[in-house]
Image (cartoon, helix red, strand yellow):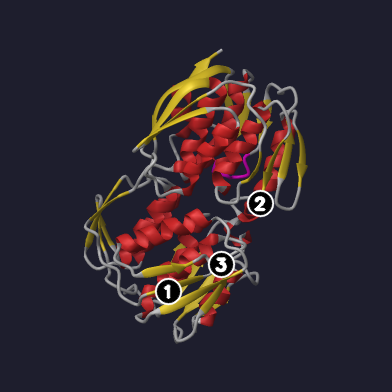
Amino acid sequence: MAEALELKPARGARGNVRLPGSKSISNRVLLLAALASGETEVRGLLDADDTRVMTEALKKLGAQFEDSRIKGVGGAFPVKKADLFLGNAGTAFRPLTAALALSGGEYRLSGVARMHERPIADLVDALRGLGARIDYAGRQGFPPLKVSKGEISVGKPVRVRGDVSSQFLTALLMALPLAGRDSEVEVEGELISRPYVEITLNVMRRFGAGVKALGWERFIVEGKPYRTPGRIFVEGDASSASYFLAAGAIGGGPVRVEGVGRDSIQGDVRFTEVLERMGASVAFGPDWIECSGKTPLRPIDMDLNAIPDAAMTAAVMALFADGPSTLRNIASWRVKETDRLAAMAAELRKLGAAVEEGADRLTISPGKLKAGATIDTYDDHRMAMSFSLVALGGVPVVINDPQCVAKTFPEYFRRFEEIVVGS
């Protein structure tokens, strides 16, 4: 794909889109299938950069892959020395750090420059509380990491902060069955992005784990090994669905996404609440969602802590509202693939919006949509996909570095082009 992609003006959107597999579910399933005893057949797995780095790491650690089948190692990883490069995949880096800390070997984990700017001290501190040996190979509190054999003890509750990233709790929960004894986790501070922890618990239970949530403050994890469910299906990615559903809301629709629906285990299906609040019509089936609407949309003032990824789609939709919108409780944007609060504010201003950026919120006052703006994407797939929606305002828009969507949705722009109606 070219270094920049110009999207032509569009006057509407309609059609059907089959979604790629959920990134969040895919990388959880890959890790637990690798740790489980037996062979797991995985259907619907996402094929993108983040899952490829996880797969390559798991192969190096002893799991066997053949087509859609994964033969697990039946416990801690048997390979006791490895150097792993994990790109900018937080859903690979954080859980592997925890699993390797309980595997009793010598490992080095690194990633791209941005990954080395994403904090990991809260997870490292929690694992050290269990007796793990983890050292920072660069700046304190950030990757890369060196993991060495420690003396793991789960006799007392392990504490982990929950107010920066839910991935720290997810990583800890998925690794603790390797301890061989029942353990308890206490969450310090308010747990953000709770629906992602619900995904974790759901997938763990599919692999036979005994895990109990006592509110959102305490979790009990049984020390029994993972076992294969035999076959598991990865549903379509609800975060990716948000772009197409938003296109239906802005561009008339109907636009239907297939592969995720009312029975989804993903929190980002709640993006439909945003759509409805903005005036769109939404319909559900067991494995599909359909949206239609018209502009101008209604402005919103919403707490979007539970759906931080899909909240980016809402920020661009705010350009099509007839008044100011405020997105609240989104501080976790600051520690994602880029500082999404700052990046989103900067790019929305290019399009004519007045934007007020707070510590954990954005207020977006739309103006006349500027034609031909060039959007910087900051090597962030969600920036590129969200801003594609601007073309539905009947203006051209240029997306820099469009290939960054390969992180989770390599075919995104092709699928988007299939549903838009030219001017």
Q: Mark 2 sits on what residue?
A: 329
- Say what amino acid the circle numbered 3 marks: Pro
User: Badge 1, how many Cα within 10 Å: few under 14, some, many 20+?
Assistant: some
Point out the stretch of residues depicted in magenta: 377-381
* Chain-order first, disc 2 or disc 3: 3
Give whichever of 65, 176 is nearer the camera: 176
* Chain-order first, disc 2 or disc 1: 1
Residue beneath the point at 50% across and 43% down: 270
State the CA–CA distance, disc 3 to disc 1.
30 Å
Q: Is residue 141 left or right of residue 57?
A: right
Q: Magenta span has 380?
A: yes
Residue 381, position in %: x, y? 54, 42
User: Badge 3, how many Cα within 10 Å: few under 14, some, many 20+?
Assistant: many
| Label of residue 220 in the image | 1
User: Badge 2, how many Cα within 10 Å: few under 14, some, many 20+?
Assistant: some
* Chain-order first, disc 3 or disc 1: 3
- Say what amino acid the circle numbered 2 marks: Asn
Residue 86, position in %: x, y? 48, 59
Residue 249, position in %: x, y? 54, 26
